């Protein structure tokens, strides 16, 4: 009888692990989608991408990935270009849009700079991906 219980227990562990694995798949996909949307795209803006040579790049502590700015004194949780008042969301193409702080040059939606101001459209929640 002990051998039969061990087989049932193993089967339960397998099923439980499989179900938990299925729940993890959407979260892995979301991370990949976010990473894919955080790539600068030269074709997205008329004035081109923000260049590292631009004096405002360093002055405003711009970074392509807001996660790298979390230690900055002005950083706030969930702050990124996509929910900033200066980011022109209506002109967004492939996760890139013009930014008023950088002379309408394109920045990526997951970027960040120290001039970030909460947009009126920002709800304070993490962004949904489609």
Image (cartoon, rainbow, N blue to C red):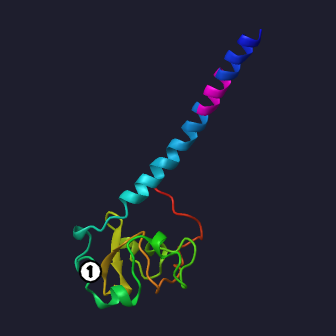
Eyeballing the image, is 98 above or below 2? below
Q: Is residue 14 left or right of residue 65?
A: right
Q: Toward which corner of the image does residue 123 lie, by quadrant?
A: bottom right
Residue 71 in percent (x, y) is at 53, 78
Residue 61 in percent (x, y) is at 41, 84
* The N terminus lies in quadrant: top right
Name the residue at 42% across, 53% down. Answer: 32
Tell me the element at label 1: loop
The residue carrying mark 1 is 51
Residue range in magenta is 11-17
Q: Toward which corner of the image does residue 45 lie, by quadrant?
A: bottom left
Q: Is residue 42 left or right of residue 84?
A: left
Eyeballing the image, is 3 above or below 37? above
Camera-side residue of 35 and 70: 70
Q: Is residue 70 left or right of residue 2?
A: left
Name the residue at 65% across, 22% down. Answer: 10
Give the residue furthest to the front: 2
Characterize the magenta stretch by its predominant secondary structure: helix
Is residue 130 at all visible to an observer of this figure?
no
Camera-side residue of 73 and 97: 73
* In the image, residue 46 lies in the stretch drawn in magenta: no
Residue 49 in percent (x, y) is at 26, 76
Give the residue furthest to the right: 1
Is residue 109 at all visible to an observer of this figure?
yes
Name the residue at 55% across, 64% down. Answer: 126
* In the image, residue 16 lies in the stretch drawn in magenta: yes
Residue 39 in percent (x, y) is at 32, 64
Q: Is residue 60 left or right of residue 120?
A: left
Camera-side residue of 21 and 26: 21
Q: Toward which corner of the image does residue 101 lie, by quadrant?
A: bottom left
């Amino acid at each position: 009888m002990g051998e039969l219980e061990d087989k049932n227990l193993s089967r339960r562990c397998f099923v439980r692990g499989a179900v938990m694995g299925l729940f993890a798949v959407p979260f892995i996909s979301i991370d990949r989608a976010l990473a894919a949307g955080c790539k600068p795209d030269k074709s997205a803006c008329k004035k081109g991408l923000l260049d590292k040579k631009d004096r405002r790049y360093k002055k405003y502590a711009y970074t392509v990935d807001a996660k790298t700015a979390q230690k900055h004194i002005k950083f706030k949780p969930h702050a990124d270009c996509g929910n900033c008042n200066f980011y022109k969301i209506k002109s967004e193409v492939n996760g890139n849009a013009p930014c008023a702080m950088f002379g309408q040059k394109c920045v990526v939606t997951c970027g960040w700079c120290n001039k970030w101001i909460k947009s009126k459209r920002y709800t304070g929640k993490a962004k949904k991906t489609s």
